[in-house]
């Protein structure tokens, strides 16, 4: 019983992390149809900022955390400016390939100017302490993750429902040109989408760093792959879909770990992606894909 | 059989590309050092990969990220068949199903590898070709990850990241040039064939072509399987020349490298594929030479590798920003010489 | 107010409008008539800046040719586009709020929204429903209201009666007539020539991307038979 409860909590906290990652991708995709593969490198920038802060500025973990979030947010906004503006209205493939290009450039810049080897950051270990809740041993990190994703979801919902900027972003996902025709600046909507995405990347970065404790040039690859998968499963472009996909992926992964016999452990990824492929065959556009409007609307 | 005007032009264009490929091969045989020969060989292998990629992406306009996996399947299948029993007893002592207890001649092995890769491509393709846009791209990504993790996990068959060695080195530069020329003709032939023409039309206007009775899904599947077979050829050629293979070259780095080649040259044309492959192969070598040469002294090797990666990424970004259709756009080589249709 | 000289609009390689000139005076309601493919919507798109165009477009003497789409709206152009283009995933109220998104005073925006809900009680009743659930006529009213939320100097209306039942069409024209009476400057694109002429001060007849005829209500109204022949409607 205790074992089951523990695994459920594991699945939920993995799911929370994946949902956080997936939301970062989905918010940009919903506005401009861009699959931002460089999201992982934004997370890595956060990680390297932690290294720099811890080594050069302060040992205070809260300042390190804020620094990482700020760096990720700035990077994300800067990438929109430099790399994604020229392909803003291009077809999704062009955007996707650009994002791949950005991802490769950043990874290799880390390699070139920082180090190919992992660099450890120990300042966040305190986040990961064992706690006993209702007789179940869990990590404090799992609690922080769950609270964060709840706060993020509530914050996003409020922002998207109540503010004009949020409404404009939702409207832009449907008909960007019409949003411009109301005089709301396209540049601002795009910048805002990347800003939120960067903020989410920064938050995700903290949890990943607290778990792994080190950053290397390929740091962002696995998280972005997970985010990708979660978005695909949930339906690309749908924010609720991203959250659902994240939690579903967390559940599948933990389920695979629990149910697969030890000797098949190495095939976990293959099984996870296999299940994803099956979901896609069942619903090619994901579970909660937004409705597409085809043809003329009168 | 009568040929249409564009098909005649296609043959002419393929001949011109073939002449260029042969010329580079001949020059390399006479002037290149051993090390350079190896580089030129791998450029030809990549050319076949990029051509295989072009068959699917250029005609259906869907992005494929799984091509290196199919190359890997071809390479491993051929390697397992062709490697002498004595070698396999050492390399794969625990192989199941008696895989280490037989050996075939290179031609039979290649045929078996083609059949296996084709069958896998067909099976996977049935699902891929039904998806659209981003969904299809992600699904191909899933294939890449699945295949790679199988290579890594079944070390008893594939040896994972360790070298699978002892493959007879039966290929030379001459054989790969001949193979590349054949593939150029196949790929250009497909582009100008009724299937290729319909597929390209359907990529431009899916609803319209469907209304005209074009079976987009079937056409995509044909292109996908043909692409898989060409990729298998590349894998076989890779294994038959090097003599050792491992799982690592069939993963993301290679996917991006070949993708950058196709994008830079222009995915819509065969000429673009050829141009992109040679331009990027050559450019990367120049950068690597700069990295290790007298310009940057005392930098250790792994850090040096970053610069070529940065350049590769920049090539993709700049191509997408400035000329998304690639250098060649919609033009094939003969259109540069002949008058416009 | 709006002065257009020698406007040429092209969609890719195809030129849809071959050098037209037209003027809309302050407080006027000017109608652009013509059959399908005459270049009416292309003209509206060019005024908004979303279509490739050459020529001169002036708003109150300011040249708009190099001004971005958003800046044109901020300088006082508002549009209810062809097909209405309601944000169907947003509530009726949210549609109006986006329409007023460029105004700084959010309190005044809310006041205007409430006033629209009084004018069109049906919109008020459905203020929290997604815009996509409204009927065609309601969507058209919403599209016009959304455009007016930005307090424009000139309102561009692209085929507001398209695809609506005759009774609803009458309501739409009633609203336009009311706006004109309130002093709003309007450029109206219509196929429904007779009703459009009734509420307009001046009319241009477009055909094949050129101005075929122009004149006041009375002069063109007299040649209504010619109109009917050209437009196929009437």
Image (cartoon, rainbow, N blue to C red):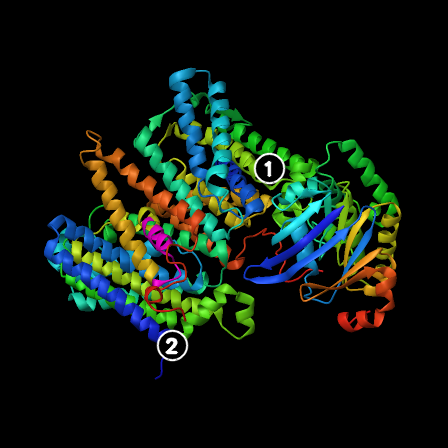
What segment carries the magenta color?
A: B257-270
- The 10 Å Cα crowd at callout 1, few under 14, some 14 to 19, many 20 or more, is few
* Whether labels 1 and 2 share one chain: no
Q: Nearer the viewer, residue C193 or B112?
A: C193
Q: Nearer the viewer, residue C60 or A236?
A: C60
Q: Is residue B243 left or right of residue A110?
A: left
Residue B265 lies in magenta, yes or no?
A: yes
Name the residue that disc number 2 marks. B5
- The image position of residue A279, as x and y in percent, is 50, 54
- The 10 Å Cα crowd at callout 2, few under 14, some 14 to 19, many 20 or more, is few
Write the residue at 33% across / 58% down. B273
Name the residue that disc number 1 marks. A188
Residue B341 figure quarter: bottom left
Give the chain letter at badge 1: A
Mark 2 secondary-structure assignment: helix
Residue C184 lies in magenta, yes or no?
A: no
Write the residue at 21% across / 60% down. B237
Q: CA distance from mark 1 to mark 2?
A: 51 Å
- The image position of residue B73, as x and y in percent, is 29, 58
- The image position of residue B116, as x and y in percent, is 30, 65
Residue C200 in sight in this render: yes
Residue B160 in sight in this render: no
Residue B178 figure quarter: bottom left
The quadrant in which the N terminus of chain B is found is bottom left
């Amino acid at each position: 019983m205790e074992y089951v409860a523990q695994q459920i909590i594991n699945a939920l906290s993995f799911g929370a992390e994946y949902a956080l990652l997936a939301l970062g991708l989905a918010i940009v995709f919903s506005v401009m149809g861009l699959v931002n593969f460089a999201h992982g490198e934004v997370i890595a920038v956060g990680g390297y900022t932690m290294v720099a802060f811890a080594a050069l500025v302060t040992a205070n973990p809260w300042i390190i955390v804020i620094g990482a979030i700020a760096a990720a947010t700035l990077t994300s906004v800067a990438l929109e400016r430099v790399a994604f503006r020229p392909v803003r209205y291009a077809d999704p493939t062009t955007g996707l390939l650009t994002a791949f290009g950005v991802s490769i450039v950043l990874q290799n810049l880390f390699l070139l100017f920082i180090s190919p080897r992992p660099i450890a950051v120990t300042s966040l270990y305190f986040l990961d302490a064992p706690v006993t809740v209702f007789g179940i041993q869990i990590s404090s990190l799992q609690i922080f993750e769950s609270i964060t994703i709840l706060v993020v979801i509530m914050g996003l919902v409020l922002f998207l429902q109540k503010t004009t900027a949020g409404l404009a972003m939702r409207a832009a996902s449907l008909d960007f040109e019409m949003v411009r025709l109301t005089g709301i600046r396209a540049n601002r909507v795009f910048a805002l989408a990347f800003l939120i995405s960067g903020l989410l990347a920064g938050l995700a970065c903290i949890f990943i760093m607290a778990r792994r404790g080190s950053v290397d040039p390929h740091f962002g690859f696995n998280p972005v792959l997970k985010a990708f998968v979660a978005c695909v499963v949930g339906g690309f472009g749908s924010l609720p879909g991203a959250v659902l996909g994240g939690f579903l992926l967390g559940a599948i992964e933990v389920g695979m770990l629990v149910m697969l016999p030890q000797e098949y452990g190495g095939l976990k990824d293959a099984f996870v992606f296999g299940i994803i492929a099956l979901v896609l065959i069942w619903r090619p556009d994901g579970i909660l894909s937004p409705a597409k409007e085809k043809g003329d609307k009168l | 059989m009568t040929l249409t005007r564009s098909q005649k032009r296609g043959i002419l264009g393929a001949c011109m590309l073939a002449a260029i490929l042969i010329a580079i091969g001949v020059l390399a045989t006479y002037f290149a050092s051993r090390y350079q020969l190896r580089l030129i060989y791998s450029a030809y292998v990549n050319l076949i990969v990029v051509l295989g990629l072009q068959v699917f992406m250029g005609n259906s306009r869907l992005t494929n990220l799984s091509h290196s996996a199919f190359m890997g399947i071809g390479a491993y299948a051929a390697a397992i068949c062709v490697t002498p029993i004595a070698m396999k007893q050492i390399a794969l002592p625990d192989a199941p199903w008696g895989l280490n207890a037989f050996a075939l001649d290179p031609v039979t092995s290649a045929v078996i590898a083609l059949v296996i890769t084709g069958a896998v491509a067909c099976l996977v393709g049935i699902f891929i070709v039904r998806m659209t846009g981003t969904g299809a791209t992600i699904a191909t990504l899933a294939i890449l990850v699945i295949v790679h993790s199988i290579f890594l996990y079944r070390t008893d068959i594939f040896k994972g990241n360790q070298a699978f060695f002892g493959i007879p080195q039966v290929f030379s530069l001459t054989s790969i040039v001949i193979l590349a020329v054949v593939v150029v003709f196949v790929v250009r032939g497909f582009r100008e064939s009724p299937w290729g023409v319909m597929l390209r039309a359907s990529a431009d206007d899916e609803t319209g072509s469907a209304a005209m009775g074009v079976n987009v899904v079937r056409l995509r599947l044909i292109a996908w399987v043909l692409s898989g077979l060409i990729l298998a050829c590349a894998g076989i050629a890779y294994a038959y020349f090097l003599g050792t293979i491992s799982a690592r070259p069939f993963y993301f780095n290679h996917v991006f490298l070949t993708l950058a080649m196709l994008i830079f040259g222009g995915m819509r044309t065969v000429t673009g594929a050829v141009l992109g492959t040679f331009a990027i192969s050559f450019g990367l070598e120049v950068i690597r030479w700069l990295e290790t040469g007298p310009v940057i002294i005392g930098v250790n090797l792994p850090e040096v590798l970053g610069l070529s990666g940065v350049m590769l990424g920049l090539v993709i970004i700049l191509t997408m920003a400035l000329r998304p259709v690639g250098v060649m756009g919609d033009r094939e080589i003969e259109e540069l010489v002949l008058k416009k249709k | 107010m709006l002065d257009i000289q020698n406007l040429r609009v092209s969609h890719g390689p195809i030129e849809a409008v071959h050098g037209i000139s037209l003027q809309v005076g302050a407080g006027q309601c000017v109608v652009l008539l013509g059959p399908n493919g005459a270049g009416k919507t292309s003209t509206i798109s060019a005024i908004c800046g979303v279509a490739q165009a050459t020529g001169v477009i002036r708003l109150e003497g300011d040249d708009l040719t190099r001004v971005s789409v958003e800046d044109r709206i901020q300088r006082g152009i508002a549009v209810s586009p062809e097909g209405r283009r309601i944000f169907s995933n947003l509530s009726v109220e949210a549609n109006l709020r986006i329409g007023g998104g460029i105004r700084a005073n959010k309190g005044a925006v809310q006041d205007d929204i409430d006033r629209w809900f009084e004018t069109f009680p049906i919109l008020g009743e459905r203020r929290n429903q997604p815009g996509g659930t409204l009927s065609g006529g309601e969507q058209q009213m919403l599209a016009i209201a959304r455009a007016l939320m930005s307090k424009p100097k000139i309102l561009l209306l692209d085929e507001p009666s398209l695809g609506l039942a005759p009774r609803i069409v009458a309501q739409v024209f009633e609203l336009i007539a009311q706006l004109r009476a309130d002093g709003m400057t309007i450029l109206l694109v219509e196929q429904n020539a007779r009703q459009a002429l009734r509420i307009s001060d001046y009319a241009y007849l477009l055909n094949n991307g050129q101005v075929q005829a122009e004149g006041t209500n009375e002069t063109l109204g007299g040649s209504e038979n010619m109109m009917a022949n050209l437009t196929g409607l009437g």
